[in-house]
Amino acid sequence: MKMLFALALLLMLAACGGSNSSGSPKPLSEPLLRFIAIGDTGTGKDGDPSHLQYEVAAMMKQVCAQRGCDFAVLAGDNMYEKGVEGVSDPLFEDAFELPYGDLGIPFYVALGNHDNSMSDIGEGAQNAKGDFQVQYTEVSPSGRWKMPERFYTQSFASRAGDADFVQLFTLDSSPISHFFDDVSPQWSGEALDAYILGQATFMQEQLAASSAHWKIALAHHPYVSNGPHGNAGQFDEGTNPDPCIGAGPLRLSDSCRGEAYKAFLEATICNEVDLFIAGHDHELYWLRPSPGCGKTQQIVSGAGAKSREVFDATRNEAYFQLGMSWGFFWIELRGDRLVGAAYALYPDGTPYNADDAGRPLPVFEQVLTKQP
Amino acid sequence: MGRRKSRRGVSRRSFLRRLGFGGAAVGVAAAASGAAVSIAGQNTRQAAISQAQSPFQHGVASGDPLNDALIIWTRVSVAGDLPCDVSWELSGSPAFEGLVAQGVVTADADRDHTVKIDVTGLAAATTYYYRFRALEFVSPVGRGRTLPEGSVDHLRLAVLSCASIPHGFFNAYRRVAERADLDCVIHLGDYIYEYGNDGYGSNVQAGGRIYEPGHEMVSLSDYRQRHAQYKRDLDLQRCHQQHPFICVWDDHEFTNDAWRGGAENHNEGEGDWATRAGIALQAYSEWMPIRLPESGNRARIYRQFQFGDLLDLIMLDTRFVGRDQQVAGSLPEQIPGLGGFGFVDAGEIASEGRELLGDAQSQFLRSALTTSASRWRVLGQQIMFGQLKLVGEPNALNLANPGGQGGVFLNTDQWDGYPRAREQLWRILRGDQGASAVDNVVVLTGDIHTAWSMDITEDPNNPAAYNPQSGEGSMAVEFVATSVSSPGLDEVRELGEEGLRVENPHMKYVNLREHGYLLLDISAERCQGEHWFVDSIAGPSRGERLAAAHFTVSGENRLQSSAAASSPKANPPALAPYEGIPR
């Protein structure tokens, strides 16, 4: 399976010899937070049997019951195929409140291209729609939907009360990379430039000022991915049809390959955050830190409802990658260590790995130590 | 607390400049590599925060059951070359209520920290559960069953082969793992593949499945890493956990189209063949739950298993230990549809001296067949035994080599390419050297990624020698198990399969497109082979179906079609509990 482990690392799981038979349990005061990383969830129950949002949500509930969850991050494309028409759009209930409302944890949400679109292809040309998802934060019946602005940061204390244990930096990536330009005055020309630069400046300032032990970035578009959308700067190259290409070789939007977005990430979160969580591609990837983005670990978790095949499995070196499945990552931050586990479903909605009682087990898990 | 963004007006040019567009990236270290990441090293279970810290990442396995013994296997992942004590225990109960046997062994770098124990003194026809402990971690619980002795009325075996990682998911292994009533699993080889990520399957890489290491395995470290990767496959681990395996290798445990002196895929720059073959043998011996029939001789894996009075299972090595080099197809390129790969039984291929088994193994096989007193004799071996002809003709029409086989053959790498060696085996089955005929022989085959059921006869296209309707003239039967994941010939479709059956009337079933396993159900009255296919290898999937079932009635030595799947055993022993890798 999938299970593309970084073997050299995993062979060093344990040192032999010096076992501690007296067993000194770790102090309970170790700072600790656990969360779900999921994306591209927003199908609701649309009748398509290949869309498993509710089945993935059911697995999340089971994993959270087993291992604990303090919050979730939602990596965009929250409302397929073309966003919502207002805060009372029934898709909020179908694609968020019903599957996740009773999990009892807040969801910190980023915007994706489909959240800002006027057509099913998710061209990203109607950014005004994304504002409804910001406004929904105030009216979500469960109160679990958290998108205070289109981009924002959020700090988390650990369970033991350590303030600033984790800080989340949520980006608004679709205005920086989309298939088709938004021609409205607020989202084109100088206004768009100002918006993007404002976001970059905000993130740079927030990152510089952050005293958080763990810094995590969240966006819809990845920096690197082995899926059809691929790496920022080369988004969708080699796909057929290529959503960047209109008539002939002309690009429909200057932004669609993501060159500016790549630069944006390298100027903001790269090497500054410990972990970058994205979606957009409907597979599960935990990729090694990438040249150009420093120490930052790269997770793509866009299989929250849809699944797709990996496009180029050797494009970026992976600790783990899995296509043709559905699922999410569960992440635990514990002191200086990060435990990451991937959970995946069969097409019939049952877990690909489960114990005899049917409780989901990870299809991949590893432990990393925080890099300075 | 949420913090609000700020907005400022700035031109696009300054935005790009400030982002460092066209210049050096801002604030980013250029270097990023594995060295920047470290796995948290935890020595003890008490301190572990993740199952990923267990040393038992490669699961457990059992194999080569006898009526009083069973091989149990695991591997511990430890840092560096340090030796590590591993304790083991075996019980008749999945909850380990009462131990039957236990011990401690030391895993060391000489064996790549693999652990293999031949647990002896066991009771026959008994299901045992086993587990290991190291570094205060406990392994998953494995399950294995000893062979029966005396009177045996029912056996069920799964037969698998050919598991290419990039071509697809090992759903077939999981389906077999779920069958609680199997006596054991027979693996006919191509358990691993040697290629790198630019080789066989690189155009598929289903679900992102790629090889470790990323290059073709050549060194000992490469072969060990590849075995280790396979042993981490979720579905293969589950299968090993529940069933003892009886394995033989095929070519890809070495490299493609191996023979005793070389291989098609052993090339310049990859060292001498003896060294590479020795490496392959070492890694196989370390990583597979196999008992060497001659201590210290890793090259010999042909061996025998007795299932009471019902079955003698004879495992052969038609690949490596005695095989002469394959001969290229003899038909000229110009012959449409056949040129370049078809061949006839004449010339070098037809020569008397060409060996497939070698002398010692041939003697072993003759003895095993002629002395067997069981109801059934099953040959577990690699390559297709029956004829596979592109053009079916009776033997009498072989004018180039009178007395040889008739027609045009397809594949020189199977028994067709060693016709005189096959005739030796036919003579044993018909009875020679004063011995009587050997009845109730069932040949099991892997290697070619496709599913077949056929009668075995010397002259299948001669109606006077073999009657395809009644099966009269057949001396044995063969079941070819399809692959776990390696590709068949999807493009041939049903029409091509029907065409092959027309040219090869001894073939009762041909499927060149699907993947799965063979289920062998044996009673005193009959032996039935069932081709079970999984619904997909493109991703994780749960579906399977019975595609075809054929049986041979004791004493008849020919196949008949069966309308129904065989019945599972009543009250099978409990499966081993599965909890993932316990923390």
Image: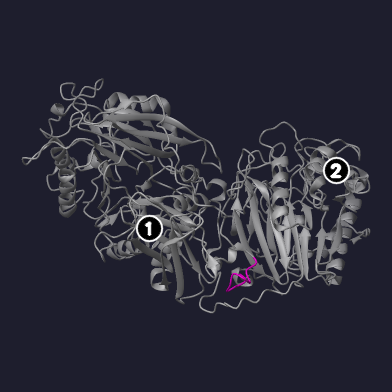
Give me the residue at 61% from left, 69% from top: B39
Choose between A164 and A252: the one closer to the eye: A164
* Quadrant that contains the N terminus of chain B: bottom right
Question: Which label belongs to residue B289?
Answer: 1
> Does the stretch in magenta take in B47?
yes
Disc 2 target residue? A182
Using residue A153 as the reference point, say whether residue B400 is left or right of it. Answer: left
Give me the residue at 51% from left, 63% from top: B56
Secondary structure beneath dot 1 equals loop
| Letter of the chain that mark 2 sits on in the rendering | A
Does residue A94 appear in this view? yes
**Magenta region, main secondary structure:** loop
Q: Which residues are magenta?
A: B39-49
Give me the residue at 41% from left, 38% from top: B569
Using residue A258 as the reference point, say whether residue A20 is left or right of it. Answer: left
Choose between A208 and A188: the one closer to the eye: A208
**Residue A8, above or below B203:** below
